[in-house]
Image (spheres, grey):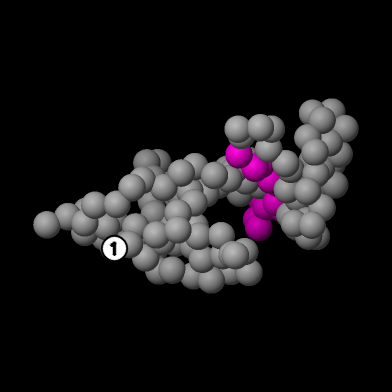
Amino acid sequence: MATTIAAPTLSFALLHVADMDAAYRYCTEQLGFVPVPEYNGPAFRMFAPAEGGIPFSIAAAPEPSKVGEIELYFYTQELENLRAALLDRGVDAGPIESPPFGQIFTVPAPDGVSLTMMRPAQ
């Protein structure tokens, strides 16, 4: 019997860029995005969402072929249960990993893109 659990919520979008400084200037000076400096690092910049929106960030592309790639993050507090439910449904859910910003696992989406399921760090 398949495990049921609420679908996670799209909560974060990240765009891989070739030139962090140029992209940051464009996002702030041209588009008017508001930076969130406490989350920024040398290869990552976050922008505050408008009311009701989701955070948007840019990150240095890890390789040239990744420039322009977008990552979508779906937040859930039930990370383990969500992964178990997806595995029950035959989804190829990756292992849970623990980067500094929370816990994550990825699942494939159509056309070879991955979606990231995440429980943010508290």
In the rendered image, residue 61 lying in the magenta stretch gets the answer yes
Q: Seen in the image, is 73 located left or right of residue 40?
A: left
Tell me the kind of residue under disc 1.
Ala
The quadrant in which residue 42 appears is bottom right
Number of callouts: 1
Quadrant showing the N terminus: bottom left
Quadrant showing the C terminus: bottom right
- The residues colored magenta run 54-65
Residue 67 appears in the rendering: no
Residue at 80 percent of width and 44 percent of height: 35
In this rendering, the answer to whether 5 lies above or below 94 is: above
Q: Seen in the image, is 63 located left or right of residue 88?
A: right
Question: Which residue carries the number 1 mark?
Answer: 84
Q: Seen in the image, is 120 located left or right of residue 43?
A: left
Residue at 49 percent of width and 42 percent of height: 10
Mark 1 Cα-neighbour bin, 10 Å: few <14, some 14–19, many ≥20: some
Q: Position of residue 50 (x, y in %)?
A: 69, 32
Residue at 50 percent of width and 60 percent of height: 119
Residue at 72 percent of width and 41 percent of height: 48
The one nearer the camera, 56 or 113, is 56
Q: Position of residue 29 (x, y in %)?
A: 88, 32
The quadrant in which residue 87 appears is bottom left
In the rendered image, residue 121 lying in the magenta stretch gets the answer no
